[in-house]
Amino acid sequence: MTMSTKQVTNMEQLLEGIWKQNPVFVMVLGMCPTLAVTVSAFNALGMGVATSFVLVFSCGLISLLRKQIPKEVRIATYIVIIATFVTLVDYIIQAVSLALYDALGAFIQLIVVNCIILGRAEAHAAKNPPLPAMVNALGMGIGFTIGLLALGSVREILGAGKLFGITLFGEHFQPWVVMVLPPGGFFVLGGWLLLFAWWARRKNAGPRSPHPNPLPEGEGANVPLRGTSDKRGHHGA
Amino acid sequence: MSDEKKPVKMVVMQPAVTGSGRMIATLGSVTALCGVLIVAVWQWTLPAIAANKKLVLERGVRALVPDAERVTEYDATVGGITPAKGDPVAGAVRFYAAYDGAGKLQAIAAEGAARGYADVVRVLYGYRPECECIFGIKVVQMKETPGIGDKIITDAAFVANFDNLDVALAPDMKSLFNALKTVKHGSKKFGWEIDAITGATITSKAVGRGINDSVQMLLPRLRPHLEKLEKQEKGEEGREKGQNLGAALHSPFPLHPSPFSSQGASS
Amino acid sequence: MSIELRPSPHLHSGRDVPTIMRHVVYALFPVCAFSIWQYGLSALALIVTVTLSCLAAERIANRMSGTVNTLSDWSATITGVLLALTLPPAFPLWMGAVAGFAAIWLGKSLFGGLGHNPFNPALVGRAFVQAAFPTAITTWAPAFAPQRFSEFIPSSLTLPFMVPNDISAWVAANMVDGFTGATPLARWKFEHFVYPVEDMITGAASASSGETSALLLLVCGLYLIARKFMDWRIPVAVVGSAMIMAWGFQLYDAETYPPMHLALLSGGLMLGALFMATDMATSPVTPMGVWVYGALIGVLTILIRYFGGLTEGVMYAILVGNAAAPLIDKYLQPKVFGARKK
C-alpha cells in the first residue's frame, strides 16, 4: 500500500481490489447495492459491470485532471464527473436491456453515491497517473463484481433453483423464498463474511497466537481480519 | 496508509490559496465537458432505447393478442384519441390498438397499475370492443411475495377471471355499468366480479383496482371514437413500422431478448 | 489448616441449567405424545428430525468455535422439541431439518451460545422457514386419520430441496369429517366461521403439531409453575392481556372481530405464552418488567392477528417482545433498598 515509497506494479494494483482490499468482503463498502440487487446472478453481474464502468472512467478522468482541480472544489468536481458516468451507464443499460434496467431500478442512479467510487477517487486517482488509477479502479470494480456475484449466485441458486436463469435442479425444486427477499441478502452476506473470517483466522493461527478464549463464530468474525488488513478497511464507509 | 496522508504543510491551517475565478473556471469546464459527453451518449443510445421499449411493448401485446400483426400506440384524452408521440402527456391514457394482417382492429390493450403488497403491480389487459369485455391480462411488473402474491400469474382459476370480464359502459357512457370488484375467494356471482386468491387478497385486489381505474378512465374516452380505429391505413402504419425497424438496425446494440426475464414476473 | 474463602452466594437452590431444562423436557412429553397420537408417524418423525438437527447444529457450532460440548445442557433438545411443536404436522422433514439448523445457528450460536441469545432460538428457526417456505408452513393435515400409525403423510417424506408432495389425494383417502385445511384463525379471517370450542380443546382443529389442545398445554405449564421452574407472571400477563384485547374488540364490534375464546384457544397462544415467552435468556428479569413484557406480547399477538396480513401473530409478537426485553429491564430497574434519589 505504500505507493510513495515503493514501486507498485500494475498487477499488484489490479489484485489489490480483487483480493486484498475486496470492497465487499474486506472493506465492506457499497453495501446498499450489494444487498439490494443481488437477487439473481445476472442482476449482480449487471450491477458489478455498471459500477466498474463508472469506477474506471471516472477515476481515469479524475486522475487526468488531478493537477488542474483546486483542492477546495475537488469533491464537487469528483461528484460531477461520477454523476456523468452514471448517467451514461443509465442510458447504455436501457439500450442494452430494458429488463435489466427495470430489475436494477433506482440502484443504477444510486451508483453515484456508492462510496467505493468517491473513496477510490479521493484515495487513489487524485494522487496517481491515469494508467495506475484506472488499473486500480478496474481491480476494485472486478472485486466488487465478484462480491456481488458471490451473493447473487447463492441467492439465485437457493431462491429460485437457477443460475443465470438456467434451471439447475429440475422442476420440483422448492425455492427458498426468503433468499430473494431482503433478509436473504443479509443472511448470505453474513455467511460469506463468516466464511472469510474463519478462513483468515485459520490462516493466521500460527504466529499470531489465537485468542486465548476463542470467541464463537459470530463475535469473532471481525477480529482476525483486522489483523491482516492494513486498517484501510473502514475509511471510506 | 501513507498514500492518503496529506503533506504536513496542508494540514496546517492556511487561508485558501486558490482564487475563486480559477475554481469557477475549473468546475465550469469540467461541467461543460460532462455535458457534451452526456449529450453524445444520449444521442447514440436513443434509437436503441426507443426500439427496445417498442419491442418490449409489442411482445407484451402479442402475448395477449396472438394474431396481432401490428400494434399502434394512441393516447386517449378528454378531447378524443390521438396517435401517441413520445412519453404520455399528463392526464392521457396510453393504449395500444392491435391489428391483424388485413388491417382490421383485433383488440385494444392498455395498462392498469395499483399498489399491491410490496410494490406497484402493473398489468396489461386486453379489451375487445364487440363483447365489451376484457379477455386476458398479462402482468407487466410486480414484486409481490414469491409463492403467495405471484399466484396472480400462476393461479389458473384467478387468471380465468379475466377470460371474459364484463366492462360494459353505462348508458350515459361516462362510467362502467358495473364497476369491477374483487370479491372474496369463491363468492364470485357476476360477470364483473373478480374471484380473489385465498391468502393473496391484497395482490388480487390490486390487480382488480388497477384494471378498474384504467378502464374507467379509458373506455368513456375510447368508445365514442372507436370507428376511427376500426380500419388501419396500411401505408401509414407500414411506414411507421419501417422507421422503427430502421432505428433498430442502426442501433449499435443487438435486440435479442435478454437472458434476464423481466417478464421475470411472467415466467 | 487451610481456611477456604469464597465469594457469595453461599447458598443456592441446587438448581442449574440442565435441571431446569430437563424438567421443561418432561413437561413437553405429554404435548409430544398427544401430537403423535393425533398425527401418527409424521409427527413422531418431525419431532425426532428437528431435535436431531438441532443437536447436530449445536455440535458443529461447538466444534467450529472451539467451545466445550454443550449438548448435555439440554437446551438444544428443548429448542428442537419446541420448534417441532410449532411446525405443521405434515411439514416435510427436510424443511424441519433446515428449521433446526437455522434455529441453533442463527438464533443461538451466532450470538455466543446459551444465555447470550437475544431471541428465542426455536422461534428464530420457525421465522426462517416461515419466510423461506410460506406455502409449506401453511399446509395443514387432518388429525386422527385412520392410517396415521401405518403410513406417513406423503409430504413428510419429500425428497430434500424438492417441492412438498401433494397431500390432497391422501386427505381424500383418509377422509376425516369436515377437514378444510385451514386453521380456526384462518377460517375466521377468511370465512367468518367460528370453530366449536370442543374441537379446539380435543385437538380436532387444524393447527401446528403442538398447539392443538390448549387444555393439555395449560396442564403441562401448570406443572412447571408449581415446581417453580417458570415465572408464572409471564404466561398470566400474555394470556391476560390478549384476553382483555380480544374481549374489548368483541364488545366494540362482534361482527368484525372473532369471539374471545377463539383468540385464546386457537393457534400458538398457549404454547407461546407458556413455553416460549418464558424462555429465561430472552425475557426480562425485573418484577415490573415481566408484566410489561407479557402484556406487550399479548397485545401484539391480537393486533397482528386482527390487522396484519398473517393469521397467526404469536411468533412475531414474542420475537418483538424478546427484542424489547433489555430495554424493558433498563427502564424498570427496581430501586435498590436504601438507595436515595440523587
Image (cartoon, grey):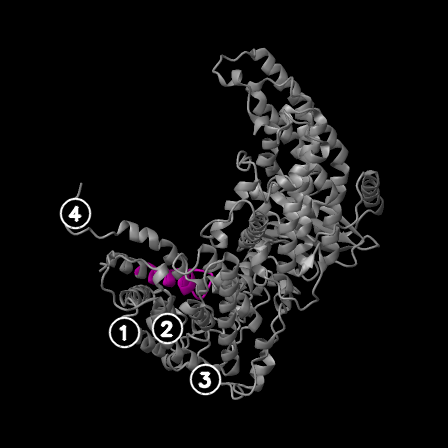
Dots 2 and 3 on the same chain: yes
User: Which is more toward the observer, B244 or A34?
Assistant: A34
Q: Is residue B145 left or right of residue A15?
A: left
Q: Secondary structure at mark 3?
A: helix
**Identity, as a three-letter code, of the amino acid under mark 2:** Arg
Q: Which residue is mark 4?
A: C339
Q: Amino acid at mark 1?
A: Arg
Of the two numbered discs 2 and 1 in the rendering, the one whose residue sits closer to the viewer? 2
Check residue C37 in the rendering and tell me which mark sits there, or answer none.
3
Mark in front: 2 vs 3: 2
Q: Are marks 1 and 4 in contact (CB under 8 Å)?
A: no
Give the number of the disc on residue C132. Answer: none
**Crowding near the residue tagged with mark 2, few <14, some 14–19, many ≥20 C-alpha atoms within 10 Å:** some
Q: Tell me the chain of label 1.
A: C
Whether callout 2 and callout 4 share a subunit is answered yes
In the rendered structure, the answer to whether residue B51 lies left or right of residue B161 reads: right
Which numbered disc, 2 or 4, marks the residue closer to the eye? 2
Q: Is residue B50 left or right of residue A66?
A: right
Lower sequence index among marks 4 and 3: 3
Q: Which residue is mark 2?
A: C22
Q: Mark 4: which secondary structure? A: loop
Q: CA distance from mark 2 to mark 3?
A: 23 Å
Asked if residue A190 lies in the magenta stretch, the reply is no
First in residue order: circle 2 vs circle 1: 2
Q: What separation in Å lies between label 2 and label 4 (alpha carbons)?
A: 39 Å
Q: What are the residue bounds of the magenta stretch?
A: C295-317
